[in-house]
Structure formats: structure tokens, C-alpha cells
Amino acid sequence: MVFNILYEDKYLILADKPCGVISQDAKGECFPKMIKEKLGIDYLGVVHRLDTTTSGIIMYSKDPHLTGRLSELVSSGGYYKEYLAVTEGALPFDGCEKNENGMVELRDFLYHDKRKNKSFVVKGERKGSKRAVLEYRTLDVRENAKGDKKSLVSVHLLTGRTHQIRVQLASRGHALVGDGKYGSRDNGCSAALHSYICSFTHPVTNKKIEIECKPCDSYPWNLF
């Protein structure tokens, strides 16, 4: 499987994970194994994860002494990520209340059912639920060949919950295109979610790293 290394130094790697590939170490085909084989290296530490159906930028550590620091960078908010998503329907933006970043905020409590591996929006705080906050901006709305409206959306997570983007948008009637698990009836693709932009200060060199990675030129991304 072809994939791109977006940034590499002796401490870390940023790579473009293909859709359908597991982002952590696992039996069989997984992204860490693919990278190690491509670069001929023995160690690659998992810093954060992307859903198997999510493509785009992901960071790994090349130094076992740095893996914990990189994970802390991500969990503390020092690693800025922006996603692109394509949703069902015209996701409201104009006329909605905006935050200081000019984006619409969605706030929910989510409960993740591990047995079903599915998250649900629940009313208020309850045992096992976690607060979930994201902000989004609708970039464009187009129609596919069947005349169905699809929205291209930029999303920034303010919390990191399992399937957060997928369930928060789906709960408002705008499932990700191709995400049958959360209600999309469009089976022309996998769930349309892509890790698009990252920026952070390198914990060793103090260099500002900014990476942009566009999604593949296939449906539904090619609508836009």
C-alpha cells in the first residue's frame, strides 16, 4: 500500500495514514509495521491514534525516551489538529452563533459502549459519560450525481472522545458520508474523515512544525 512520509527527523515521524489501516500496533497489517518496513527501523512508538476509517496526518515517535513527552504534548493540547469531513446534507453555519474563533461549537455528553464499539449522545452527565466539545466551520455545500447535498466541513476537537466527530455530527442529522455505523446511507465510500492540518512546537528542537495534507482525490472529496 502506498503512503507518504510528511515529516521525519531522528525523533519523530508524521505520516499520511491511508483509510482502512489500523493506526496502532496489531496483528497483521497495521500502519506502524508498514512504516517500519518502509524505513527499515526497529522502533516506532504510538503517540496518538486515528480511527481505522480515518485517513491523514498521524504522529509516531522514533525515540522510546520521547514517546511519553509526545503523548503528553497531544493530550495537553499542544498538538493542534484540524480535520476535514464530508457530511450528509447542508450542515448549518451561516446564521449560527459563533465562538471567538468564528466557528460553531457543539457540546454534548458522550457514552461509549465498548461492547458495541459505538458512542452515543446522552442527556446530561451520567456514569460513564464524558464531556465532548468540538468546533466546526462549513466550507462548502455541493450535490452529488444523485442530487444529494453534501457539506465539506473543517473540524477542531476541543476534547478527544471515541468517535467524537462522527457521533456529534450524526446526532444532529449530519452523519459523515459513508459512515453507516452512525446513520449514513451513502455506501460509496468509507466514513469521510481526514486529519488535514497539524501544528506544534517540537519538544526537542523547539522548531515550529506545520503540516498540511489533503485528502485523496476520490468520492466524496472530489465533489469539492
Image: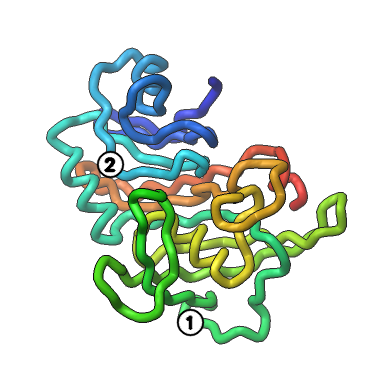
Residue found at x 69% / y 53%? 185
Image coordinates of residue 77 in percent, x first then y, are: 29, 61
Locate residue 216: give its quadrant. top right
Q: In the structure shown, which secondary structural element does the residue marked by tag 2 occupy?
A: loop
Image coordinates of residue 164 in percent, x first then y, are: 43, 60
**Mark 2 surroundings: few (<14), some (14-19) or many (≥20) residues within 10 A:** many
Image coordinates of residue 96 in percent, x first then y, are: 61, 84
Distance in Å between CA atoms under marks 1 and 2: 30 Å
Locate residue 182: give its quadrant. bottom right
Quadrant the N terminus occupies: top right
Q: In the structure shown, which secondary structural element does the residue marked by tag 1 occupy?
A: loop
Q: Is residue 168 above or below residue 197?
A: below
Disc 1 target residue: 99
Residue at the far left in the pictured view:
65
Name the one closer to the observer, 67 or 129: 129
Q: How many numbered badges does the structure rendering display?
A: 2
What's the amino acid at mark 1? Asn
Residues under numbered marks 1 and 2 in contact, where contact means CB atoms less than 8 Å apart: no
- Left or right of 137 on screen, residue 122: left
Q: Which mark is residue 47?
A: 2
Residue found at x 42% / y 22%? 29
Name the one closer to the observer, 176 or 46: 176
Locate residue 187: give its quadrant. top right
Name the one closer to the observer, 185 or 98: 185
